[in-house]
């Protein structure tokens, strides 16, 4: 593998200091800091040299698979296109959030199994270290045994418990809202979808015990666990007690505070920071405030990959966080939460996952190079 020395006047080191120094990369690791140049030399000047981004939750790849309702593209093509987006935005490790639901279609069993298999097959061809984040819909009771098998064979890198079912039941059965979004996604007629909803609702009493069995299996096989959209502090404490230590998108400040009190990492969306608010409108929490007040420790791409590199700079410019702490939200903090102790910082011996970022001071920053395990997988002309 190529030996490479990168010189920058702004290198963010593991202790949070920013130094004018060199970083030498060899055999996929950071072999030295502050040493004389050897091998291929890069001088990036005032551009930042930063730890590569670790994205624990991204599902924007679904738009490459189905860019319009009912319009499908091959999974391998979609994954290659997604990979190009990731590395062009400084992401060196990505957990693809694959929703396994009781719905057929895009989020059903056939699609989930096909995508899981495609990820495994395509992994050697993907530049980004791409991992499988299984977003298990808790009412998908029929999948429990299969998911336990996947946890046992090591093919799940992160398991998150999702429960969108109650929201769908309320929206459709209680409030009488349109089923158009769901019929387009599932391929079912209106009447077929309504009948399916009733069957799913009937299974609700069995959900808590199923979740406990799945959580126990994940803990037994050392798979990181998250709960998604916790609504109350009690819900967060209940998941924590099962070994589910990552709080994904708590729905309010009180729940985020409960997670912090338990020592649990709290995830918010980087798009929330970049947009200045939640896509849920005034009902959603403000990620910048949660970060400023110490309740958010990780940012993820959620539905928009470019937000990850932009958000820390926005936070620093707005005074919501010092830049080293802001960048840790997308690098060291998510790496530790997922149990990836070999990356997320610039330190001797660490995996050489790095991003070169130009900051004009106003407007968007630009990722000009990304290294994954020492390989320069992306480098723009500006680099």
Image (cartoon, helix red, strand yellow):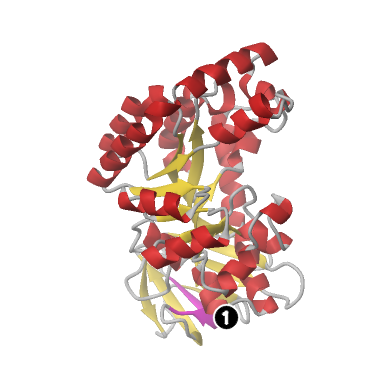
- Residue 34 is left or right of residue 287, and the answer is left
Rendering quarter of residue 360: bottom right
| Residue 61 rendering spot, x and y as whole percentages | 59, 40
Q: In which quarter of the image is residue 203?
A: top left
> The C terminus is located in which quarter?
bottom right
Q: In this view, does 349 lie to the left or right of 54?
A: left
- Let me know if residue 352 appears in the view: no
Decide which of 216, 114 is in the foreground and name it: 216
Residue 330 lies, in percent from the top left, at 52, 64
Residue pictured at 35% horizontal, 69% vertical:
350
Residue placed most toward the observer, 361 or 4:
361
Q: How many C-alpha atoms fall within 10 Å of the one at disc 1: few (<14), some, or many (≥20)? A: some
- Residue linked to disc 1: 322
- Residue drawn at the location 61% of the way across and 21% of the way down: 186
- Compared to residue 191, the image places residue 254 above or below, namely below
Residue 139 showing in the rendered view: yes
In magenta segment, residue 6? yes
Circle 1 sits in a helix, a strand or a loop, which is it?
loop
Q: Position of residue 217 (x, y in %)?
A: 27, 39
Residue segment shown in magenta: 4-13
Rendering coords of residue 32 (x, y %): 36, 78
Most common SS among magenta residues: strand
Residue 261 or residue 110, whichever sits in front: 261
């Amino acid at each position: 593998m190529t030996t490479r020395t990168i010189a920058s006047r702004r290198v963010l080191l593991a202790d949070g200091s920013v130094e004018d120094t060199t970083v030498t990369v060899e055999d996929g690791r950071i072999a030295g800091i502050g040493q004389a140049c050897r091998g291929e030399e890069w001088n990036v000047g005032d551009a930042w040299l930063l730890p590569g981004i670790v994205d624990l939750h991204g599902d924007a790849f679904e738009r490459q698979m189905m860019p319009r309702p009912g319009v499908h593209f091959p999974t391998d093509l979609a994954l290659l296109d997604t990979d190009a987006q990731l590395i062009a935005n400084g992401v060196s490790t990505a957990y693809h959030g694959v929703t396994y639901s009781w719905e057929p279609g895009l989020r059903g069993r056939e699609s989930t199994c096909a995508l899981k298999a495609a990820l495994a097959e395509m992994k050697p061809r993907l530049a980004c270290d791409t991992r499988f984040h299984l977003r298990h819909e808790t009412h998908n009771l029929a999948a429990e045994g299969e998911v336990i098998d996947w946890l046992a064979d090591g093919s799940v890198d992160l398991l998150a418990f999702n429960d969108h079912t109650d929201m769908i039941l309320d929206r459709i059965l209680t409030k009488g809202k349109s089923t158009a979004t769901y019929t387009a996604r599932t391929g079912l007629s209106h009447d077929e979808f309504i009948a399916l909803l009733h069957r799913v609702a009937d299974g609700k009493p069995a959900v808590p015990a199923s979740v406990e069995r799945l959580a126990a299996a994940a803990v037994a096989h050392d798979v990181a666990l998250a709960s998604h959209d916790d609504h109350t502090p009690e819900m967060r404490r209940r998941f924590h007690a099962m070994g589910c230590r990552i709080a994904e998108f708590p729905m309010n400040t009180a729940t985020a505070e409960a997670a912090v009190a338990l020592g649990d990492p709290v995830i918010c969306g980087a798009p929330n920071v970049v947009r200045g608010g939640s896509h849920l409108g005034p009902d959603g929490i403000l990620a910048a405030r949660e970060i400023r007040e110490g309740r958010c420790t990780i940012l993820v791409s959620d539905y928009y990959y470019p937000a990850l590199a932009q958000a820390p700079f926005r936070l620093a410019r707005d005074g919501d966080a010092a830049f080293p702490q802001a960048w840790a939200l997308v690098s060291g903090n998510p790496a530790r939460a997922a149990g990836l102790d070999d990356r997320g910082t610039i330190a001797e011996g660490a995996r050489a996952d790095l991003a070169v970022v130009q900051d004009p001071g106003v407007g968007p920053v630009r990722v000009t190079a990304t290294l994954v395990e020492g390989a320069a997988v992306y480098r723009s002309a500006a680099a």
